[in-house]
Amino acid sequence: MDEEKKVVPKGIATNVQCTKCGRLFQTNKENLKYQESFRDESGRSYLLSYVDCPNCGDRNFVQADNGDTISLLRDVKKDFSKLAAQKAKHMTISKKQLIRFEKERQHLSELRIKLIDKIDGSLLKEVSSDKEFEVRFNKCSRE
């Protein structure tokens, strides 16, 4: 997980409008909180990424992951690394490989959107602080 925290994930919105005060701001490496662990009342785990509004401090959730999406993310990263290595060696990358990679990446995006829709509005507990949050996802994170 630590390696994933160094780079802004592709699915994260770059522009955010605060769900509380309406201020528009951008996500960046400094304000994006990566993959904090949350649990629902049934004990299911979620990893949520969020930014705190610089104006009012409200927490704005922008991405959700669970075991399924984390596993698929690993596969996508592995395939991306293979394709990048092939390109660096000036090797031909087949259309079939590119289509497979794009389908896998699209599937990850779709699973994340479904997960966001499933938990949007839920009460979740942040594992590290035991604080309870009503999780509302920023509308920009769905685009």
Image: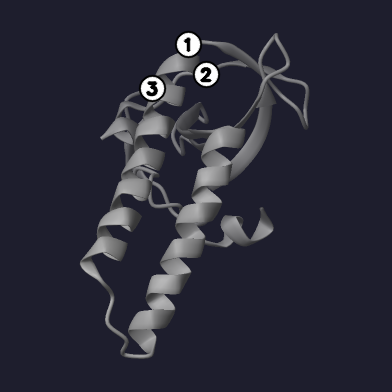
Q: Is residue 31 visible?
A: no
Which residue is under mark 1?
121
Labelled disc at residue 28: none
Location of mark 3 (residue): 19
Quadrant housing residue 12? top left
Residue 49 % position (x, y): 53, 38
Which residue is painted at 70% across and 10% down in the image? 42
x and y percent of residue 57 in the render? Answer: 52, 31
Residue at x 51% of width, y 54% of height:
75
Mark 1 closeness class: few <14, some 14–19, many ≥20 residues within 10 Å? few
Residue 75 vs 121, above or below: the answer is: below
23 to the left or right of 123: left
Depth check, front residue: 69 or 124 = 69
- The residues tagged by marks 3 and 1 sit, at their Cα atoms, a distance apart of 12 Å
Quadrant in the picture for the C terminus: top left
What residue sits right under mark 2 in the picture? 135
> Which residue is more in the foreground, 82 or 96?
96
* Disc 1 residue type (three-letter): Gly
Q: Mark 3 touching mark 1, by CB under 8 A?
A: no
Q: Residue furthest bottom?
A: 89
Amino acid carrying label 2: it is Val
Q: Which-is-in-front pick, marks 3 and 2?
A: 2
Foreground disc of the pair 3, 1: 1
